[in-house]
Image (tube, rainbow, N blue to C red):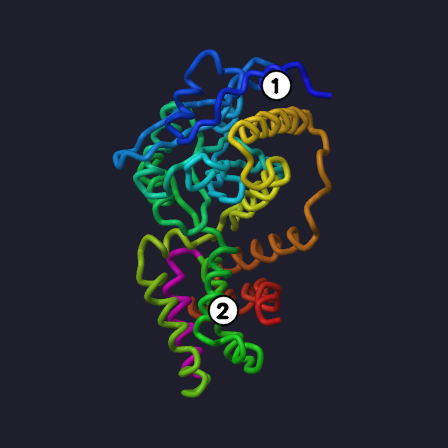
Amino acid sequence: MRTSMRRARMSRFPPIPHSLLELTRLLQDPRYRILTMTDDGLDNLYAGSVTDTAGRHHILFASERMLQKMREFNTLHGDGTFKIVPVGAACEQVFCIVGVWQHHIVPLAYALMETRTELAYTALFELLQHLLGPQILLTRVITDFEAGQQNAWENVFRVHVQGCLWHYSRRFLIVAGQLHLIIPMREIEQVRRIVRLTMALPLLPVRHIRRGFRLILETARDEGQYIFNILIDFLNYVNNNWILSDARLRRMCVFGSEHRTNNACETNNRDLRKVLGNHPNIFLFMEGLVRIERNTRILIIQLSRGQKVTRPRKRKAIANDETIERLSNELLRPHGALDAAVMNFLRRASHLMDGMIDEALH
């Protein structure tokens, strides 16, 4: 049975807007505040709209309750998704911001964005910063490796921006495939081992990543000219696109981070599709955001009371965390030469990538 709030909302649907600017005008009309009103009628999801310096328009959805919760997080995750972009909305993506609390994903804000440029992200984050005010705890944002988004987070919020280990590793395997390394990786253990070592580089402290890559290069050369020739294009890619870039080097490092991936956003995106479906109309999209806000509010209440909400973390994830913590502590207190300690770290940590590599090779 539909709630009275939902019946009222659906009965007052205006004509579907054909642009984000039209949607903004609609949302700013007092007659249609019901469209983004929370299910209890005490808050509203429409947080504001902004036009960037290139003339592209963007709309932010976040209740004041979720903004207040956002102020309490020191780490946020940001990512865009495309499958739930409302049909006919003339926007390029739905951008999502989530937090992780006690290993639970907490959806906090959503934005409809006409484009994904650095100018667009800058305008959106400046609006968000204005809404949050100065009393925030944010020190780190985790993203994929979208440079425009990363630059905007850094420039607006002055926080550390960290990339995603999963996206990094996946990118390396994609490049390995493009360079025709899949068969050599299947058949030649030395080739597979060198690629696996490069995938572990982000687990090193940032000050040791270039040292680690130099040691991987030396290891590849020590395998002989035949092996080195197979790997040279891949190693050049790693060097030219990651190691030589100060910004990418800094952002690829996940050493000491509680969250090494942006999987929280990936999971949230899947959950969004379950609630909204693919490309809903704009009114069903906003209605879905209202339901998500309600569920998030309930989750926050349950967690604040110490209630168990979902099943505990998988043993494998806990074991991986323990392994990385142990290896990291050993690296910080090396016995003997630093080169040997770094290479030992890479060899042992790289086996955490075995599952991803096996999946790519079969």
C-alpha span from label 1 to label 2: 50 Å
Q: Amino acid at mark 1?
A: Asp
Residue 132 in the image: state x and y as whole percent.
41, 24
Residue 75 in the image: state x and y as whole percent.
48, 38
- Judge left or right: residue 102 versus residue 93: right
Secondary element under disc 1, as helix, strand or loop, is: loop
Foreground residue among 278 and 247? 278
For label 1, the crowd category at 10 Å Cα-Cα, with few meaning under 14, some 14 to 19 and many 20 or more, is some
Residue 130 falls in which quadrant of the image? top left
Q: Is residue 127 above or below residue 256?
A: above
Q: Is residue 19 above or below residue 233?
A: above
Name which residue lies at 38% across and 37% down. 114
Marks 2 and 1: in contact by CB < 8 Å? Answer: no
Question: Which segment is the magenta one?
Answer: 205-222
For label 2, the crowd category at 10 Å Cα-Cα, with few meaning under 14, some 14 to 19 and many 20 or more, is many
Name which residue lies at 43% across and 40% down. 140
